[in-house]
Image (cartoon, coloured by chain):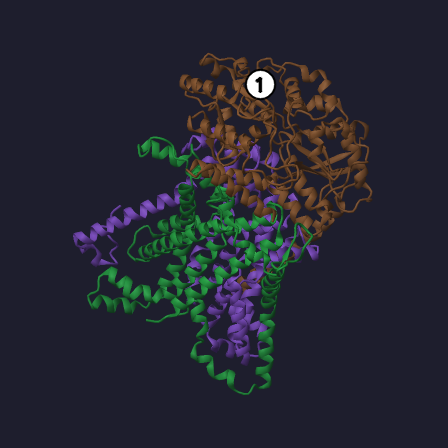
Chain colours: A purple, B green, C brown
């Protein structure tokens, strides 16, 4: 862990005084500790998915050979396929609809702004303060009235429109050059077409950032699906693994495997879109 | 610079100011209608899915009765009055606020430091460090709660490690004692959310005007001084946003309390949302009282957000 | 540029299509589901069931299905695993929203929670009093769990009769046999426990910290409960409860009762040789028998009695559950199914007993030979016959609708007492908490 030599592009770095070098070394030690603490539990999770319950409880840090047995005991009593399907369906549907609804609203608030629309924006922002717990019971009754318990709609609808996403897209619309809109209008493009053909392609990083946040929130959502998805056939992955510890005997190997499977989609999405993610929140248009 | 925050939201850029005041031409009118059409789906959804249930909850909080037999409370504020005698709710409120005041500052300061280190263009293996620090943010809350529950078990990884190092002689019953159980929740929250906030701060750091940093250097300011007097002020809107988000998230926390400690021992790690769930669905169901509890949570969130925005909006 | 947009549009379209098809398929599923509107063609032969333990009550249901199929070849069960922690909130939400159409035909209910649900949400249940199910063939005390105002709502399933299960090899190292632990008092039990601990380093018992199951079993063995006959909490000024807590704390202090944090840790201490025994409902024998390497080293006897209380017995109960027919059921079929299996088949109980350790409440089952057969795992002891004889001596327990609130409150009080709070003050607070919940 040294930082003594640096690339030739930065000739000055090689001449750092001792103090700076120590500071630099300290920085790498610090980062290493943070990285270890960060990855440690995940490593344990991955390794445990291949171990027997005894090995998991003995805190074995070496990969075992029990992966297939764990998979078998996991799928023996749990319908993992169905839970993955419902989790994916809920998360993808939420993400796609949220991106469409919130981006067009964010764009609308910025590009066609008027005092009344600004006022509406303020009111919508107030919703950010509403804790979910406060709306849960009436929301449940609302969906029950419409016969939507156990439906994908019941999980998706409350998660589509969020103040945070509208705000994010409004900010990105603010950095979108209005000259482009004017030029497009002169070319006779319809307003809707301007949004889809000009704004959407330019704002890919923002969409990526919004997609990551929304997908992860939707995938990880636990309390609301737990309340609204009454029929066990509709249970999602987080519900499945939470119920795992409710049985009389816990198979830790299988539990860790289930935990790993639950985490994989979000990890993949996150890292595929990681770069655009930071860029999206930066709001820089490239 | 276009960092989005509730604070900057208010301040519309100059370039749009003139247009709105003029008499609207037919084309502009049409456009205004198009704009409304763009907003309506999002606004209606928020209205129906958040404001309407919130209003319903208010009505519900004035009603009492078990199960489905609900009646108007007499007096109307009975549920709120009853809350004053609810020791368990007071305990869960204390727990939640404790998580808030301990965990949020530690997390955000660590995130700021890490983001600053990661932002250094001369840092080596940058993508490795980033990956390592971000990855917990991709893990589901239920998943990590169960992993933490396993590694902090009496015969779990943490005790095995501490015994092996010789740090302790007897295993610590992490989840069985109030202090350590709360500590495990806080450690879990730090693990899961610090990297998440680093992302936001990295984004904010990209927006810092490099000339201001150069100027500070020219004035002879060291890196730490520069960080506090140049970097931090420019990140203020983003910091405000993360403070509000973290506060909100902590006050509403449910998954960790439910899955990691089950609220125990003796309810001393239970959060307000977890208690609300117990009151509404697990115990003899009392939806009216549950709704009243939820309004108290709402008021706490709103007051904290208002204070934070007030403090955050002060310009130096 | 266009690629991205096309991708987005396609993804949106695809998702909507999937979403819609999923929703419509869910509708389809509901109408095919017998728990929906009955009367549909095939629906008449299938029952949906909610139960929670694949190795125990779900297994029993599967066996009951086989038994019923002998007479009704077209009959099938759709058994869905729902943990108890999830089943209760589900019932609450369904009742609250009046969505009874989502209920299964039959669901399992903890005996201790039966009163609460039947009183709060009678709409969830079908009154089975006059449906020809032979409830008189169950012990009165067990049927009482699911009886509200004279109406029966449940068919008792497994017995919660408490057993004192011991590792003969471990207590043997301290020179004791099972007989030494039979018909003893708690102070004798503690004295022997200290010897066992000194000789082997192994505590006698284990249990989950903050969960008062052991204490409540002691309480019930003394003929007392947390509520009086009118359903008022009696947590304060309850001499039997005070004595039980005292015994419990003494055992914890002396290291002969190991407190753990979770159910699986508790099971772990039993199957991994971490304790010399356990006291719990007889259903625990299923978990004990998973430790195949300990076969032959276990024995079962009755519970120690609390000497400080007059009339204290050696018998108690913990847990136990009953089947309820929902208000959404194909009542005729469900009632006939339960009447011919859980309330009418010796053959059925003979199958589930040895393989799952499910001791019946159904009295005629006890006459079967299977109950008198020696169990190799328990050193050739006919433990199930013994359990049936224990069951006859269990004092009735008054659970009421607020049993779980009281149980939680007592659990909190015990944790506080352990942390140094004055016992009387902690129990006063527990009483206040329960009274608050009932107010």
Quadrant in the rendering for residue B173:
top left
Q: Is residue A283 visible?
A: no
How many numbered marks, from 0 up?
A: 1
Residue A286 position, x and y percent, is 42, 67
Q: In the rendered view, would you say C97 is above or below A53?
A: below
Q: Which residue is mark 1?
A: C301
Q: In what element is the residue under mark 1?
A: strand
Residue B193 position, x and y percent, is 42, 52
Q: Residue at x 76, y 32 (%)?
A: C338
The residue positioned farthest toward the bottom in the image shown? B23
Q: In the rendered view, would you say A4 is above or below C276?
A: below
Q: Chain of mark 1?
A: C
Report crowding for label 1: few under 14, some 14 to 19, many 20 or more residues within 10 A (C-alpha): many
Q: Nearer the viewer, residue B174 or A221?
A: B174
Q: Is residue A240 visible?
A: yes
Q: In the rendered view, would you say B36 is above or below B225?
A: below
Q: In the rendered view, would you say B91 is above or below C176?
A: below
Q: Nearer the viewer, residue A13 or C375?
A: C375
Q: Nearer the viewer, residue C58 or C152?
A: C152
Quadrant in the rendering for residue C300:
top right
Q: Is residue C70 left or right of residue A136?
A: right
Residue C381 position, x and y percent, is 60, 14
Q: Is residue C79 left or right of residue B203?
A: right
Q: Nearer the viewer, residue B290 or C26?
A: B290
Residue C366 position, x and y percent, is 71, 20
């Amino acid at each position: 862990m040294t930082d003594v030599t640096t690339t030739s592009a930065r000739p000055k770095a090689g001449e750092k005084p001792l103090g700076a070098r120590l500071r630099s070394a300290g920085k790498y030690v610090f980062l290493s500790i943070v990285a270890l603490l960060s990855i440690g539990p995940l490593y344990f999770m991955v390794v445990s998915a291949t171990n027997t319950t005894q090995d998991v409880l003995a805190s074995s840090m070496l990969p075992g050979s029990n992966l297939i047995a764990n998979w078998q005991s996991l799928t023996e009593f749990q319908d993992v396929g169905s839970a993955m399907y419902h989790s994916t369906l809920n998360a993808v549907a939420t993400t796609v609809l949220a991106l469409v609804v919130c981006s067009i609203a964010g764009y609308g608030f910025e590009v066609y702004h008027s005092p009344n629309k600004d006022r509406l924006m303020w009111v919508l922002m107030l919703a950010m303060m509403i804790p979910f717990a406060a709306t849960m019971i009436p929301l449940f009754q609302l969906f029950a009235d419409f016969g939507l318990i156990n439906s994908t709609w019941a999980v998706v609808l409350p998660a589509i429109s969020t103040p945070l996403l509208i705000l994010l897209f409004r900010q990105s619309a603010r950095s979108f050059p209005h000259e482009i809109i004017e030029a497009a209008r002169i070319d006779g493009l319809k307003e809707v077409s301007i949004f889809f053909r000009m704004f959407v392609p330019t704002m890919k990083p923002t969409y990526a950032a919004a997609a990551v946040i929304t997908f992860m929130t939707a995938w990880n959502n636990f309390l609301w699906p737990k309340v609204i998805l009454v029929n066990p056939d509709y249970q999602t992955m987080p519900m499945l693994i939470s119920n795992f510890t409710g049985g009389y005997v816990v198979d830790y190997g299988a539990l860790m495997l289930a935990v790993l499977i639950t985490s994989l989609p979000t990890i993949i999405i996150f890292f595929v879109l990681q770069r655009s993610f930071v860029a999206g929140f930066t709001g820089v248009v490239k | 610079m276009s960092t989005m925050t509730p604070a900057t939201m208010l301040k519309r850029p100059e370039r749009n100011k003139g247009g709105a005041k003029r008499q609207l031409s037919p084309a502009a009118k049409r456009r205004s209608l198009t704009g409304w059409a763009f907003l309506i789906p999002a606004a209606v959804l928020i209205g129906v899915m958040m404001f309407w249930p919130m209003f319903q909850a208010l009505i519900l909080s004035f009603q009492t009765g078990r199960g489905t037999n609900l009646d108007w409370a007499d007096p109307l504020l009975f549920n709120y009055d009853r809350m004053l005698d609810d020791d368990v709710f007071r305990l869960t409120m204390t727990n939640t606020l404790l998580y808030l005041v301990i965990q949020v500052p530690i997390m955000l300061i660590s995130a700021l430091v890490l983001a600053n280190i990661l932002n250094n263009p001369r840092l080596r293996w940058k993508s490795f460090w980033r990956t390592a620090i971000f990855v917990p943010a991709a893990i589901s809350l239920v998943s990590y709660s169960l992993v933490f529950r396993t590694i902090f078990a009496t015969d779990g990884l943490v005790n095995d490690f501490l015994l092996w190092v010789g740090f302790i002689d007897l295993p610590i019953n992490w989840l069985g004692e109030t202090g350590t159980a709360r500590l495990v929740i806080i450690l879990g929250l730090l693990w899961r959310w610090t990297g998440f906030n680093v992302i936001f701060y990295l984004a904010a750091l990209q927006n810092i005007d490099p000339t201001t940093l150069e100027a500070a250097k020219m004035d002879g300011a060291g890196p730490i001084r520069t960080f506090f007097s140049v970097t931090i002020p420019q990140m203020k809107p983003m910091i405000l946003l993360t403070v509000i988000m973290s506060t909100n998230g902590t006050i509403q926390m449910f998954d960790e309390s439910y899955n990691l400690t089950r609220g125990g021992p003796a309810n001393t790690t239970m959060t307000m949302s977890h208690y609300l769930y117990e009151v509404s669905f697990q115990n003899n169901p009392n939806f009216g009282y549950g709704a009243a509890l939820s309004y108290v949570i709402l008021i706490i969130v709103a007051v904290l957000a208002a204070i934070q925005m007030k403090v955050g909006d002060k310009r130096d | 540029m266009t690629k991205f947009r096309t991708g987005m549009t396609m993804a949106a379209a695809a998702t909507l299509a999937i979403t819609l098809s999923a929703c419509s398929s869910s509708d389809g599923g509901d109408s095919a589901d017998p728990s929906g509107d009955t009367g549909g063609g095939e629906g008449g032969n299938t029952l949906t069931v909610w139960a929670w333990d694949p190795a125990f009550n779900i297994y029993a249901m599967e066996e009951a299905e086989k038994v019923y199929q002998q007479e009704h070849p077209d009959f099938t069960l759709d058994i869905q695993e729902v943990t108890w922690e999830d089943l209760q909130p589900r019932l609450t939400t369904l009742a609250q929203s009046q969505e009874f159409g989502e209920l299964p035909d039959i669901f399992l209910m903890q005996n201790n929670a039966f009163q609460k649900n039947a009183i709060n949400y009678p709409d969830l249940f079908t009154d089975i009093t006059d449906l020809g199910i032979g409830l008189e063939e169950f012990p009165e005390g067990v049927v009482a769990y699911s009886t509200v105002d004279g109406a029966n709502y449940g068919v008792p399933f497994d017995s919660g009769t408490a057993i004192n299960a011991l590792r003969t090899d471990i207590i043997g190292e301290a020179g004791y046999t099972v007989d030494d632990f039979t018909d003893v008092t708690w102070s004798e039990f503690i004295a022997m426990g200290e010897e066992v601990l000194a000789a082997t380093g192994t505590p006698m018992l284990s249990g989950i910290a903050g969960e008062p199951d052991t204490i409540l079993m002691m309480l019930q063995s003394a003929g007392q409960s947390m509520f009086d006959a009118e359903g008022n909490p009696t947590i304060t000024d309850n001499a039997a409860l005070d004595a039980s807590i005292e015994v419990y704390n003494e055992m914890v202090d002396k290291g002969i009762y190991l407190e753990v944090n979770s159910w699986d840790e508790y099971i772990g201490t039993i199957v991994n040789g971490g304790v010399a025994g356990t006291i719990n409902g007889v259903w625990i024998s299923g978990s004990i028998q998973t430790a195949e390497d300990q076969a032959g080293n276990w024995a079962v006897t009755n519970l120690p009695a609390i000497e400080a209380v007059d009339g204290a017995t050696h018998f108690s109960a913990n847990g136990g559950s009953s089947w309820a027919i929902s208000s959404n059921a194909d009542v005729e079929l469900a009632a006939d199914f339960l009447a011919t299996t859980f309330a009418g088949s010796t053959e059925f109980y003979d199958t589930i007993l040895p393989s799952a350790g499910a001791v019946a409440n159904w009295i005629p089952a006890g006459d079967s030979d299977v109950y008198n057969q020696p169990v190799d795992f328990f050193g050739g002891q006919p433990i199930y016959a013994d359990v049936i004889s224990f069951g006859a001596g269990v004092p009735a327990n008054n659970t009421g609708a607020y049993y779980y609130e009281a149980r939680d409150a007592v659990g909190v009080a015990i944790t506080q007492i352990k942390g140094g709070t004055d016992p009387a003050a902690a129990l006063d607070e527990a009483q206040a908490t329960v009274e608050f919940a009932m107010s």
